Amino acid sequence: MIVFLLRRAAQVVLTTLVALVLVFIAIRLLPNNPVLARFGQHAVPDQVAAEMARQGWDRPLPEQLAAFVSRLVRDGDLGESFFYPERVTAGLARTFPATVELALAALLVALPIGIGAGVAAAVWRNRWPDFVCTSGSLLGVSVPVFFLGICLMSVFRDLPTGRRLPPGASFVGTTQFIALESLLRGQFDVFLSALEHLLLPALALATIPASLVARVTRAAMIEVLAADYVRTARAKGGSPLRVVLHHAFPNAAIPVANIAALQAGQLLSGAVLTESVFDWPGLGRHLVQAVQVSDFSVVQGGVLLVAAVFVVVNVAADALYAVLDPRVRGSGEIDG
């Protein structure tokens, strides 16, 4: 197991490094000049040249990359924003917790719905629960998130959007995780208010992962329910509920846990559209605003952060899969 984890850790470092180089080069190849975008059409050439020199964007590309990596490794610094009066790292630290909280809320909504629907569809295969589950999951992955978000806001007009707390309310905490920290502190009025603001964006974001989890759960449960040991458990007089929950689901949970862990990484990157629709003050909206003003330093830092988190979450999913299935540790490969 230690060898398996060390191999996966090496993959995290290598993959993150490759992603860093690719993102860095791709950002430099974009046609827009971030300094010109900042100063506008009345920019003075000397002023633009001085700002480019100060930011280091006038140096050769390998020299820029070496300086960027050195600064990142030494100080954890992702550079200076061209547009916002703050370091890139500060902007990401301010907005990323809101995205993580939204993704966690969506995952907490998606898992019970997806697993419950998948189990019901497998137990009552080819009957109306199966039809409802398969049709619902197909609809869930087909409807665009932005359209679903607009529909939710139209139907639930009384629920708040656009903020994490009501206007005028504030929360002074050590982190930006308002819902989690207020719950841990016992400030239940703040926690309930934060949940109310999370509800609609979390529902919209949870649609696709819930549909995928339901489809994987259904397929895994159908295979397990046909196994000999499940038939033996039924023959011994086990109740249908005990057979499903005690004998069948634990073995079907391996692929379900894998797809759930993978979806956790997808939620972080997929929150961009949801945050834009609901005006959620998270990383996705921060990056969209940075793209609109050609603030490439922020875009570069945000993409690198999402890529790094995505790689780490995927490796964690592999490790979880290996813990649940010892055959994976032996082969060192993940099938499917």
Image (spheres, helix red, strand yellow):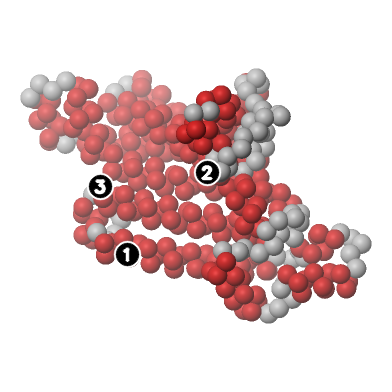
**Which element is circle 1 on?**
helix
Seen at 11% across and 28% down, the residue is 233
User: Can you say whether 195 is above or below 310 in the image?
Assistant: above
Q: Is residue 215 left or right of residue 294?
A: left
Q: Where does label 1 land, which residue?
A: 6
**Which element is circle 3 on?**
helix
- Residue 328 position in % (x across, y down): 25, 55
Instruction: Using a 10 Å C-alpha cutoff, classify the residue at mark 1 as few (fewer than 14 neighbours), some (14 to 19) or many (20 or more).
Output: few
Which quarter of the image is occupied by the N terminus? bottom left
The three-letter amino acid code for the residue at tag 1 is Leu
The three-letter amino acid code for the residue at tag 3 is Leu
Q: Considering only order in the chain, which callout, 2 or 1, is on the residue closer to the N terminus? A: 1
- Please say if the residues under marks 3 and 1 sit with CB atoms less than 8 Å apart: no
Task: Compare residues 332 and 192 and report the one nearer the observer.
Answer: 192
Q: Is residue 55 left or right of residue 102?
A: right
Q: Is residue 270 visible?
A: no
- State the separation of the CA atoms marked 1 and 2: 26 Å
**Which element is circle 2 on?**
helix
